[in-house]
Structure formats: C-alpha cells, structure tokens
Image (cartoon, grey):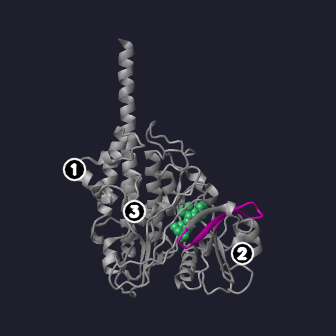
Amino acid sequence: MRSSSSSSSAGGSAAGMRRRSDSVGGGRGDGGSDDLSRYSVATTTASSAPSDRSSASRGAAAFLDVFRSCFAPAEASLPETSFSDDFVSNPSQQLSQSLSSQGSTSGSTIESKRSAKSLYGPNKNSSEREIPGDRQFSLPEIQKATKNFSPNLKIGQGGSGTVYRGQLSDGTLVAVKRAKKNVYDKHMGHEFRNEIETLRCIEHLNLVRFHGFLEYGGEQLIIVEYVPNGNLREHLEGLNGKILEFSVRLEIAIDVAHAITYLHTYSDQPVIHRDIKSSNILLTNNCRAKVADFGFAKLAPTDATHVSTQVKGTAGYLDPEYLSTYQLTAKSDVYSFGVLLVELVTGRHPIEPKRHITERVTTKWAMEKFAKGDAILTLDPTLEATAATNLAVEKMYELALQCLARKKKNRPSMRRCAEILWSIRKDCRELVKATASLSEAAHMEQSRK
Ligand SMILES: Nc1ncnc2c1ncn2[C@@H]1O[C@H](COP(=O)(O)OP(=O)(O)O)[C@@H](O)[C@H]1O
Ligand SMILES: [Mg+2]
C-alpha cells in the first residue's frame, strides 16, 4: 500500500518521494505482500544525444523472426519448456467527461500513438485481432463484469490501486485496475495516464494486453487481459502450493527478456519499464510470463541517449547510477533484470531485512558467493541441485553480474541478455541429453554383465 512516508535515500534534492508496495491477496486468498518500497522522486527534465536504439536496431532482422512469433496467441507458440526430466516441466503445473469509455476514439486528452493500425488493419478487417486499447467500455458494463467491484473478485492490491477480475458479457476475462481515489495526489492521475499511453504503444505475447480504459468522475479504470496464474513473487514463495522448477524459471527469464527487448527496441516508440520486479510479472496457466504494470513506464525519445527524469522504481531493483544521476536509460531495466535473475535463482526478495547483515542484500550476497565459486549454495533450497541446474546457475550469475554493473555502459543490452539466456537453455538441454545417454549406456552395460 502506498504510504506517505518519504526518505532521502534516493538523493538529497529529491522531492515528492513516495513509498508503495505491491501486495496480493483478496480473491486468490493468498494475502501475500511485497514490502519493498516503490519510489517516485521528482527531479529534472530531458537531455538529448544520439540514441542507442538506432544502433540497437542494427541486425534486428534476425531477431524479428523471434519477435514476430510473439504476436501469435499465447498458448499457440509455447516452446518446449523443460530441459531435464527432473526440471520438468509440466508447464501446466506449473472516464473525460461521460459514462462512455475512452478508447482511441475518445475525447480523452490521451492520444493514440499507435502506428500499428496500418500493420494490423482496422478492427473490422481483423475480427479475431483487436487493436490494443480500442475497446469501448461503459461504467455499468465494468460494474457488471466485476460484480460492482466485489471484494471476492479482488486479485491484487498495488500502490496505485486495486485490481479486480471481471468477465465481460461476451465471456472475455479481464483484469480491471481501479486507481486509488486520492484527490490530493497528483501522481496518481499521472500514473494512470502514463500507463494508458504506454499500453497503447505496445503489443507483445509477453506483455499484458490492453483492452481499454474508462475515466468518469473519480473513477479511473484500466482494463487489460486477465492473466490467471498469479504473479511471479507468489510462485517463488510457493503460495500456490507448488515449487517453480528451475527450467520454468529459466523460461520465465527468457520471456521477460523478450518482453523488455521488445519494449526497448521493437515497440512503436521505445519504452523503459522502470519497475521490473517479480510482482509485476504475471504467469499464465502454462507458466509463461507476461510483464505488467506500466504506471512508471517512460516513453523514451528516439533521439536521446538518456532522459533526466523522476527517479521511479522499487527499492532493491533500482539502478544505482540512475539513482545518483537521475539519468534514465534502457540500461536501468537491465539492472532490474539482473536483480530478477538472482531472485529467480535464490527465490529470495532483493532485500531480506531479517537475515544476517551479510545476506540482507540478496544480489550482493549471491554475487559474492559466485565470485568464490559457491554459486550453487545460493540456490533456492526448494530446488534440487542437478548438474544442469548447477551449469544454469553459474551462467545465469555470470549474466546477472554483467547486468548489475555499477556503470550502465558495462551492462549488456536486453537483447544480448535474451541471446545469452537462449544459449544457457541450449547448453543445459545438451547436458541433460548427454547425461541421459551416458546413464543409459551404463545401464545397458550393467544388464549385459
Ligand atoms: N492482468 C492481470 N491479471 C491478473 N492479475 C493481475 C493483473 N494485473 C495485476 N494483477 C495483480 O495485481 C497486482 C497489482 O497490479 P499492478 O498492475 O502491479 O498494480 P500497481 O501499479 O498498484 O503495483 C499484481 O501484482 C498482480 O498480482
Ligand atoms: Mg505493480
């Protein structure tokens, strides 16, 4: 929940810092909460220089094929998930002024920046494919879908509002994010509009799909696709009663890397998410990941290397260079992604206040163990340390170490992260195969004797 507490830890001149956390519960009855602080610090304006997006677009063709496949319906393009019998890998286990909605045709001040209409054609020509955010909603329709925002349908509680599950009259399941009504907090309205602006520019298999929004009186509602299987943090905590296998964690890392690569490089306008963390990663029934929560996202100018802006994000995931310079680049997401990699391996929160001082900052603890050759000791104790897991942990930490570099110039691009993760998956699968054929040969030899 958002609180008015503030701190100067993100910079002495910081103003308007706020604290918020994502927590979940209600409808799913899990009541888990994320006590990490999410910050917004008002600072300065933009600066410009040549973009790293233009260079990032070089050699994009090879990658485009991969990303094109991501426009396919989620469950239709599932890659093979497991690379070990142990790892398995059963993925299944795994409002404006009126009552009318404000899609791109609305009188809203939010303009559609999508250029994808030409790519997909108008709605009427693609009956099965709706343009993100184009759906028109009325308040009565959403009230009906959510049983008038029934507490029983509450699926999430974040700093910016409450999220409800709903079912539209055509049967579509949706998640409705109802912004907190706080007339004194201008940030809230800004976050709401920001999220809509961003959602309109994006469309990717590994990002929550935007249906539309509604603004009426004090109500601000964002309607997106419902992702049925909770968020990653809940899974890491075992709140759904199942262990998230390592191979599935690696697939989730790959999905998130795809999503952020798309945001940084291939979306209509480059987007910096600014709040990559486990509670903003939602899982489908097949444990495919979808990145959510664009309240803090920044549409980056195409002709600038960085934007000097408010520091926003969540403690523990925040890029230290951004925190000290206020200069935001795509590499801030890369830093957060490095934190997420460590989170996936260890299952721990980025900050664990109750642990011994040497283990409170999870990335520091894990990277120190890695440097001593003891990476495997940081593995989530609920997981088995097989040879493939061992290899994957070493390689994921090698990548995490690069992502966590103090200087952004030393961090890889998100696209490079995705490539490295693919190769980790490949190496692990090969190791599993080799181990399996070795033991089969040994078994046959044994039975011959
Ligand atoms: N589309 C969705 N489908 C299912 N659950 C969702 C969806 N969007 C959000 N949630 C749940 O609500 C929580 C808070 O949502 P989020 O968009 O992160 O809000 P906030 O900006 O307040 O953090 C998420 O962690 C998740 O558990
Ligand atoms: Mg959130």
Count neighbours of disc 3 (C-alpha within 10 A) and say few if under 14, some if 14 to 19, many if 20 or more.
many
Q: Disc 2 residue type?
A: Gln
- The amino acid pointed to by label 1 is Lys
**Residue 264 percent coordinates (x, y):** 44, 70
**In this orientation, which residue lies closer to the viewer: 35 or 412?**
35
Q: Which residue is mark 3?
A: 337
The image shows residue 245 at horizontal and vertical percentages of 46, 44
Quarter of image, ligand 1: bottom right
Q: Is residue 144 left or right of residue 406?
A: right
The answer, for residue 19, to whether it is visible in the render is: yes
Report how far apart the C-alphas of labels 3 and 1 lie in the structure.
Answer: 23 Å
Residue, disc 2: 136
From the viewer's perspective, is residue 404 above or below residue 138?
above
Circle 2 crowding by C-alpha within 10 Å: few under 14, some 14–19, many from 20: some
Which span of residues is magenta-colored?
158-176
Q: Main secondary structure of the magenta part?
A: strand
Q: Which mark is residue 372?
A: 1
If you read the primary sequence from the N terminus, does the residue marked by circle 2 or circle 1 appear first?
2
Q: As rendered, which of 250 and 414 lies closer to the eye?
A: 250
Q: Per the image, is 355 magenta?
A: no
Q: Nearer the viewer, mark 3 or mark 1?
A: 1
Q: Name the one closer to the observer, 374 or 207.
A: 374
Q: In the rendered structure, does residue 162 fall within the stretch colored magenta?
A: yes
Q: Disc count in the image?
A: 3
Image disc number at residue 14: none
Q: Determine the residue positioned at 31% across, 54% down.
A: 397
Look at the numbered disc 3 and give the secondary structure of its residue: helix
Q: Quadrant of the C terminus?
A: top left
Q: Nearer the viewer, mark 2 or mark 1?
A: 1
